Image: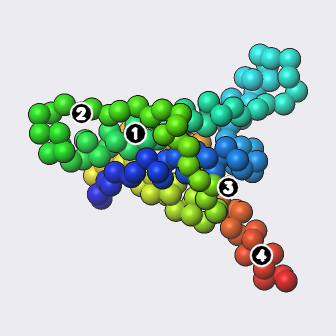
């Protein structure tokens, strides 16, 4: 298993697409997050903020960079790993079609694991990533079914 370092463009496009997709924002929060927000506020509905999306995508970016540095220690000959944080402007990208977003998310998911099976992303974020990939797959399947019925 090789870990490839994805460019910031892929992460920016993923962040932008998630932010502008109501379907993806609907599955963004876990049941636990929704429950806590509803229990601790006077609101009747939960809402995903831009900061929520950008923070999540930045964690994906950092985990990807750590996995690459761990898998390929020769990338850092002095043994020091330096990963620059992304600014909000770094995460401004383009909206991707569902199939392309799914491909980017699958590449990120694949890259988070090393040959030793180590994963550099927390379980809650991994579940969120898997929910987003599932939502993309379901959207693509719904689209195919609609075309076949036509």
- Whether residue 119 sits left or right of residue 22 in the image: it is left
Per the image, label 2 sits on a secondary structure element best described as: loop
Instruction: Say whether marks 1 and 2 touch (CB < 8 Å).
Output: no
Q: Earlier in the sequence, mark 3 or mark 4?
A: 3
Q: Which mark is residue 145?
A: 4
Q: Note whether residue 135 is visible.
A: yes
Instruction: Say whether marks 4 and 2 touch (CB < 8 Å).
Output: no
- Whether residue 53 sits left or right of residue 87 in the image: it is right
Vertical position of residue 2 compared to residue 25: above or below: below
Q: Which residue is mark 2?
A: 81
Q: Position of residue 14 (x, y in %)?
A: 56, 50
Mark 1 or 2: the one toward you:
2
Q: Earlier in the sequence, mark 1 or mark 2?
A: 1
Q: Which residue is mark 1?
A: 63
Q: CA distance from mark 3 to mark 4?
A: 15 Å
- Whether residue 94 sits left or right of residue 45 in the image: it is left
| Residue at the (72%, 50%) spot, across then down | 21
| Figure quadrant of the C terminus | bottom right
Q: Position of residue 1 (x, y in %)?
A: 30, 59
Q: Which residue is mark 3?
A: 135
Q: Position of residue 86 (x, y in %)?
A: 44, 34
Per the image, label 4 sits on a secondary structure element best described as: helix
Mark 4 or 2: the one toward you:
2
Q: Earlier in the sequence, mark 4 or mark 2?
A: 2
């Amino acid at each position: 298993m090789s870990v490839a370092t994805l460019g910031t463009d892929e992460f920016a496009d993923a962040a932008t697409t998630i932010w502008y997709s109501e379907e993806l924002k609907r599955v963004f929060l876990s049941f636990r997050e929704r429950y806590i927000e509803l229990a601790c506020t006077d609101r009747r509905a939960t809402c995903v903020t831009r900061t929520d999306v950008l923070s999540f995508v930045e964690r994906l970016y950092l985990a990807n960079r750590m996995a690459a540095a761990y898998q390929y220690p020769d990338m850092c000959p002095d043994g020091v790993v330096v990963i620059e944080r992304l600014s909000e402007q770094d995460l401004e990208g383009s909206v991707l079609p569902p199939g392309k977003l799914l491909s980017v998310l699958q590449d990120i998911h694949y890259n988070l694991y090393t040959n030793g099976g180590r994963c550099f992303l927390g379980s809650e974020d991994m579940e969120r990533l898997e929910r987003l990939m599932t939502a993309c797959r379901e959207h693509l399947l719904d689209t195919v079914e609609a075309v076949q019925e036509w």
